[in-house]
Image (cartoon, rainbow, N blue to C red):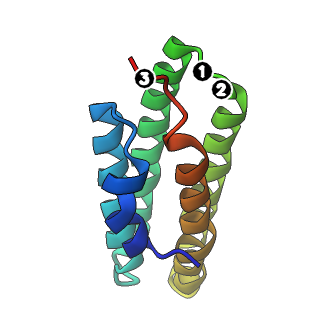
Amino acid sequence: MITINTLIADFDEKYRTGISQLDQDFQKGLLLLKETIQATDEQLPVLLNKLLEHYQLQFFEEEAVFTAYDTPRVERHFREHQTALGILSGCVENATAERCGQARYALMGEFSQWLARYFHEYQRVAVPET
């Protein structure tokens, strides 16, 4: 299983898109994900909402870039965004006092693995070089 620390460490070498704004957004999201995973149960609901808002905005901006480039596999890529937002929304819903562990487990497992697969499949091939 790939950890968030591995994703952060490997980002520059393996997953950078070459589009400054997207790369900055991805790095910010990774650091926010790490902070959220390490949060106390009291901090978790607030940070999960912040994480969800970050990825909603990031995906919106990314979709505008991808639409402008008219890249292949755009529709599948956009469906991947919806999958991720669904996972994060589920985490937000589970972040009640008695279910924080469940939400954290989903972040460390399901969402982190989705992110690793997403980076591997899309980042190097998503946008044509100019």
Q: Which of 75/55 is in front? A: 75
The mark closer to the camera, 1 or 2, is 1
Q: In the rendering, at what x and y percent does residue 43 appear?
A: 34, 75
Residue 57: image tag: none
Q: As shown in the figure, which amino acid type bears the numbered disc 1?
A: Thr
Q: Taking the image as drawn, is residue 50 in sight?
A: no
Residue 48 % position (x, y): 44, 63
Nearer to us in this view, 87 or 71: 71
Q: Which residue is mark 1?
A: 71
Question: Which mark is in front, 1 or 3?
Answer: 3
CA gap between label 3 and label 2 equals 16 Å
Q: Are marks 1 and 2 in contact (CB under 8 Å)?
A: yes
Residue ID for mark 3 = 129
- Front residue of this view, candidates 14 and 7: 14
Q: Residue at x 64, y 33 (%)?
A: 78
Image-based side of 121 in relation to 27, left or right? right
User: Quick one: label 2, few (<14), some, or many (20+) residues within 10 Å?
Assistant: some
Q: Which mark is residue 74?
A: 2
Residue type, numbered disc 2: Val
Q: Is residue 95 above or below residue 63?
A: below
